[in-house]
Image: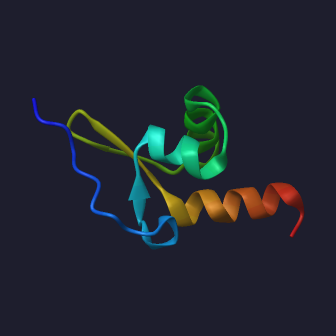
Amino acid sequence: MRKTLSRGKDQNEYLTVNADTLAAMLDCGRATATKIGLDAGAKIQIGRRTLYKVSIIDKYLSAMSGE
Protein backbone atom coordinates (compact mmCIF):
# COMPACT_ATOMS: atom_id res chain seq x y z
CA MET A 1 0.00 0.00 0.00
CA ARG A 2 1.30 3.43 -0.84
CA LYS A 3 1.69 6.08 1.82
CA THR A 4 -0.51 9.19 1.70
CA LEU A 5 1.47 12.15 0.42
CA SER A 6 1.80 15.38 2.33
CA ARG A 7 0.85 18.17 -0.04
CA GLY A 8 2.75 20.94 1.76
CA LYS A 9 -0.19 22.78 3.30
CA ASP A 10 0.19 25.03 6.28
CA GLN A 11 -1.26 23.41 9.41
CA ASN A 12 -3.88 26.16 9.66
CA GLU A 13 -5.35 25.17 6.27
CA TYR A 14 -6.35 21.60 7.13
CA LEU A 15 -10.03 20.61 7.41
CA THR A 16 -9.24 17.12 8.67
CA VAL A 17 -6.06 15.43 9.84
CA ASN A 18 -4.93 11.93 10.75
CA ALA A 19 -3.80 10.99 14.27
CA ASP A 20 -0.11 11.61 13.61
CA THR A 21 -0.68 15.09 12.19
CA LEU A 22 -3.09 15.89 15.02
CA ALA A 23 -0.42 14.86 17.54
CA ALA A 24 2.07 17.17 15.83
CA MET A 25 -0.43 20.05 15.82
CA LEU A 26 -1.23 19.58 19.52
CA ASP A 27 2.41 18.89 20.44
CA CYS A 28 1.51 15.71 22.30
CA GLY A 29 1.66 11.96 21.81
CA ARG A 30 -0.51 10.01 19.37
CA ALA A 31 -2.54 8.36 22.14
CA THR A 32 -3.32 11.72 23.77
CA ALA A 33 -4.23 13.23 20.40
CA THR A 34 -6.68 10.43 19.61
CA LYS A 35 -8.22 10.76 23.09
CA ILE A 36 -8.73 14.49 22.55
CA GLY A 37 -10.23 13.80 19.12
CA LEU A 38 -12.66 11.26 20.55
CA ASP A 39 -13.60 13.43 23.55
CA ALA A 40 -14.26 16.35 21.22
CA GLY A 41 -16.45 14.23 18.93
CA ALA A 42 -14.27 15.08 15.94
CA LYS A 43 -13.64 11.53 14.69
CA ILE A 44 -14.58 10.81 11.08
CA GLN A 45 -14.34 7.22 9.83
CA ILE A 46 -14.00 6.78 6.06
CA GLY A 47 -13.53 3.11 5.30
CA ARG A 48 -10.46 2.05 7.25
CA ARG A 49 -9.14 5.59 7.48
CA THR A 50 -9.71 7.68 10.61
CA LEU A 51 -9.58 11.46 10.39
CA TYR A 52 -10.28 14.21 12.92
CA LYS A 53 -12.03 17.49 12.09
CA VAL A 54 -9.74 20.35 13.11
CA SER A 55 -12.46 22.98 13.64
CA ILE A 56 -14.29 20.80 16.19
CA ILE A 57 -11.07 20.13 18.09
CA ASP A 58 -10.26 23.85 18.08
CA LYS A 59 -13.68 24.68 19.57
CA TYR A 60 -13.32 21.87 22.14
CA LEU A 61 -9.92 23.07 23.30
CA SER A 62 -11.12 26.68 23.48
CA ALA A 63 -14.04 25.58 25.67
CA MET A 64 -11.73 23.52 27.88
CA SER A 65 -9.42 26.49 28.39
CA GLY A 66 -12.33 28.76 29.31
CA GLU A 67 -12.20 31.13 26.35
Residue at position x 77%, y 64% in the image = 62
Location of residue 13 by image quarter: bottom left
Residue at position x 52%, y 71% in the image = 12
Location of residue 29 by image quarter: top right
How far across and how far down the image is residue 41, in percent? 55, 48
Horizontal relation, residue 47 to residue 16: left or right? left
Closer-to-camera residue (12/32): 12
Scheme of colours in the image: rainbow
Image quarter hosting the N terminus: top left
Asked if residue 4 is positioned above or below residue 66 in the image, the reply reads: above
Residue at the extreme left: 1
Residue at position x 47%, y 46% in the image = 21
How far across and how far down the image is residue 43, in percent? 45, 45
- Labels in figure, total: 0
Closer-to-camera residue (15/12): 12
Asked if residue 25 is positioned above or below residue 28 in the image, the reply reads: below
Asked if residue 42 is positioned above or below residue 12 in the image, the reply reads: above
Residue at position x 23%, y 33% in the image = 48
Horizontal relation, residue 31 to residue 11: left or right? right
Horizontal relation, residue 65 to residue 55: left or right? right
Location of residue 63 by image quarter: bottom right
Image quarter hosting the C terminus: bottom right
Horizontal relation, residue 40 to residue 1: left or right? right
Residue at the extreme front: 8
Asked if residue 18 is positioned above or below residue 56 in the image, the reply reads: above
How far across and how far down the image is residue 8, in percent? 33, 64
How far across and how far down the image is residue 38, in percent? 56, 39
Closer-to-camera residue (64/7): 7
